């Protein structure tokens, strides 16, 4: 562990893979079990994250892929300093909906991966990254089912490319980001159960240290 005594748990996956649902279910289960939990997300709710959400909703246009990659990395460092690290230092469990692998998958598709990795080199690794593995078709069905306006990376062909990009970066960073792959095609209850079992093992490990 590089900071404090808490645990930093991240959920990753393509749009429609269920990261938001599963992050909130995991937080609820851990709270019920008596853990102090901080739920958070990237783009964050800080100043740079707010700008990024505008760009994702196309309310803010004209930012190049290069600038977006820089903003995602800047938001991450701000999020770490203002939310994640303080909570970890207090011994809390921090659950983040998305983190560095999102940048490597999404921004790494459009910009050189080595550059995106370099931008994110200062961001501490996650103690556990749960990768919700879902094929692009299943994820598209879920996205279309939940309605809402289409975001920047929502188009189905983009999501197929994102799924391939995640496959690559998950393999490459499996060890450094402590990635555990979860079959995200099962029902929300089944996925939640598998995630909780994995997280319990990681939290118990802390107890033995
Ligand atoms: P998402 O997590 O689905 O949030 P919401 O439910 O509010 O739409 O959307 C975040 C989008 O941002 C998603 O398409 C992935 C993208 N993203 C990046 O491209 N790079 C990053 O570093 C992060 C954190 C997210």
Image (cartoon, grey):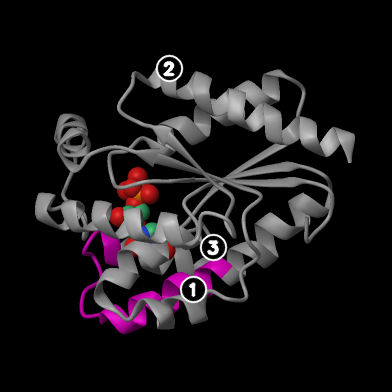
Residue at the (37%, 76%) spot, across then down: 113
Which residue is denoted by mark 3 in the rendering? 46
Secondary structure of the residue carrying numbered label 2: helix
Q: Is mark 2 within 8 Å of ligand 1?
A: no
At x 23%, y 65%, the residue is 59
Q: Which residue is mark 2?
A: 190
| Residue lying at 36% horizontally and 35% vertically, measured from the top left | 18
Q: CA distance from mark 2 to mark 1?
A: 33 Å
Q: Is residue 64 magenta?
A: yes
Tell me where the magenta segment starts and ends, as one range: 55-76
Vertical order, 143 against 56 (above or below)? above
Question: Callout 2: 10 Å neighbours few (<14), some, many (20+)?
Answer: few
Is residue 90 or residue 12 the one in the foreground?
A: 12
Q: Answer whether residue 130 is visible to the viewer in this image.
A: yes
* Vertical arrangement, residue 141 with respect to residue 74, above or below: above
Precedes in sequence: disc 2 or disc 1: 1
Marks 2, 3: nearer the viewer: 2
Ligand 1 located in image quadrant: bottom left
């Amino acid at each position: 562990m590089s900071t404090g005594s808490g645990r930093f748990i991240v959920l990753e996956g393509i749009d429609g893979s269920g990261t938001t649902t599963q992050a909130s279910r995991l937080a609820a289960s851990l709270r019920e079990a008596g853990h102090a939990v901080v739920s958070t997300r990237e783009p964050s709710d800080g100043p740079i994250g707010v700008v990024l959400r505008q760009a994702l909703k196309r309310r803010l246009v004209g930012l190049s892929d290069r600038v977006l990659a820089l903003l995602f990395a800047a938001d991450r460092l701000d999020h770490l300093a203002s939310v994640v690290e303080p909570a970890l230092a207090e011994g809390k469990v921090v659950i983040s909906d998305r983190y560095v692998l999102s940048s490597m998958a999404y921004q790494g598709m459009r910009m050189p991966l080595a550059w995106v990795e370099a931008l994110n080199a200062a961001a501490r690794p996650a103690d556990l990254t749960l990768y919700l593995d879902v094929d692009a078709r299943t994820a598209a069905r879920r996205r279309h089912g939940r309605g809402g306006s289409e975001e920047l990376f929502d188009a189905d062909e983009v999501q197929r490319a994102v799924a391939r990009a995640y496959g690559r970066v998950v393999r490459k960073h499996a060890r450094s980001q402590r990635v555990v792959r979860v079959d995200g095609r099962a029902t929300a209850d089944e996925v939640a159960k598998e995630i909780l079992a994995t997280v319990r093992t990681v939290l118990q490990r802390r107890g033995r240290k």
